[in-house]
Amino acid sequence: MPTASSSLFLLCFLCLFSVLKSQSDQLQILLNLKTALQKSSTNVFDSWDSSRFICNFTGIACNSGNSVTEIELSNQNLVGVVPFDLICKLQSLEKLSLGFNSLSGRVTDDLNKCTNLQYLDLGNNLFSGPFPEFSSLSQLQHLFLNQSGFSGVFPWKSLENITGLVTLSLGDNPFDLTPFPSEVVKLTKLNWLYLANCSIGGMIPRDIGNLSELISLELSDNNISGEIPSQIGMLKNLWELELYNNSLIGKLPVGIGNLTKLEKFDASMNYLEGNLSELRFLTNLVTLQLFENELSGAIPAEFGQFKKLVNLSLYGNKLTGPLPPQLGSWANFIFIDVSENFLTGLIPPDMCKEGTMKQLLILQNNLTGEIPASYASCTTLERFRVSKNSLSGTVPTGIWGLPNVNIIDIEFNQFEGPVTPDIRNAKALGQLFLGNNQLSGELPEETSEATSLVSIQLNDNQFSGKIPEAIGNLSN
């Protein structure tokens, strides 16, 4: 009979043999993965050598038992077809990150064998065909498949078995058109949902209010119709809400003002109507974009007190009344476009108070008064368009010579006075539109020193003298 010591020795030997075989198997899997992707222009595989310990391979992490738990090869210029049949033999694999590469081919059903995956990133690649059913990946918490070339019918039913998902990013794939999937609104642990540009149709379900952990909801560039449900006001942790370029109708829902953590809101290019009054409570807004809708009424005076607002785009609506006088005066304001409305009153004077403004676009309204002198020192300004209003007075000295401005458009107003010689400093100026005003005097010789000029419109003014000959020598 074998002694106790010999039995113990045999057991230890078998354990050691098992460990060594496991190490050998894992090594072979990783070397085969390297071979499959060998045409990649990368040095990430330089350390993947049979003479080295696998847990020291670049991009590989292991647990205490030296089993591979992570493959992190995102953003490594990888090309080729991923051998999921091999990868999913790594039974302890919890993280597979291959995003931001140029991987191609199909994702095979073998992916279902990666049953311990918690993190899967295949986003921003060049895959083809449909994404396979994946309900066996019940441990998944983070799934990134965005912008990867997947098509056909997405297996939404698979999500029913993956209730722990925190991140779901499927956007920018040409899937077949589908109504808003009911499986998604049952994923109550989600905090990040990216379904933009992936052929979602139908209406946003009322059950969207179940996703109370969401901080980012992106549904833009789809075929979504109907109204924005009032239950969206239950998502009180949202800091980003993107709904642009759909077919949404109706008013901004009562309750959207509850989203007081919201910093980014974009529902542009829809058919929304009604006023903006519900938004007056969103004091943390950084960027608000609602252009090309059918919104009406006044811009809430409270917007003038928003201390984080840097980007406001409301063009192409039916808004009336004045711009809040203190608009943009609190933060590093960058951009305003309220063109093509029916706004009245004065241009707020302090939108470039912090010296960061790049675009001032308020054309085609009914604004009156003069251009505030403060904009003459707004050296960051790149686009200055106030045409088709009822503005008057002289253009403040300094605006002509703003060093970074590439368009000055003041057409169809009642401006008077001269173009001043400081236009020589406008080295980036490509378009100068001055027509249909009451500007006078001679066009200064220094205009020819604005060497980027491409287009000049001077018609219907009271200019005198000759156009400087040197303008004809401008190369553009």
Image (spheres, grey):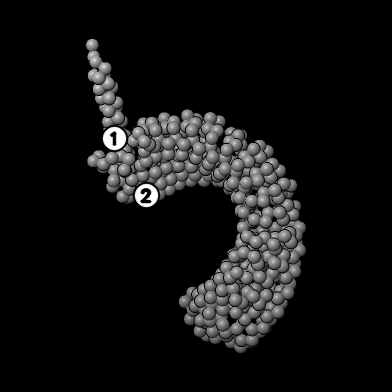
Identified by mark 2, the residue type is Asn
Left or right of residue 428, residue 372 in this image: right
Which residue is located at x 42 percent, y 39 percent?
A: 95
Q: Is residue 223 above or below residue 411?
A: above
Left or right of residue 321, residue 245 in this image: left
Which residue is located at x 45 percent, y 42 percent?
A: 121
Q: Position of residue 170 (x, y in %)?
A: 52, 42
Out of 335 and 338, give the one closest to the viewer: 335
Quadrant of residue 417 within the rendered picture? bottom right
Instruction: Residue 22: tell me if it is visible.
Output: yes
Outermost residue, top side: 1
Outermost residue, bottom side: 465
Residue at the disc numbered 1: 28
SS at mark 1 in the image: helix
Residue at the disc numbered 2: 77
Q: Position of residue 6 (x, y in %)?
A: 23, 19
Left or right of residue 409, residue 22 in this image: left
Q: Which mark is residue 280?
A: none
SS at mark 2 in the image: loop
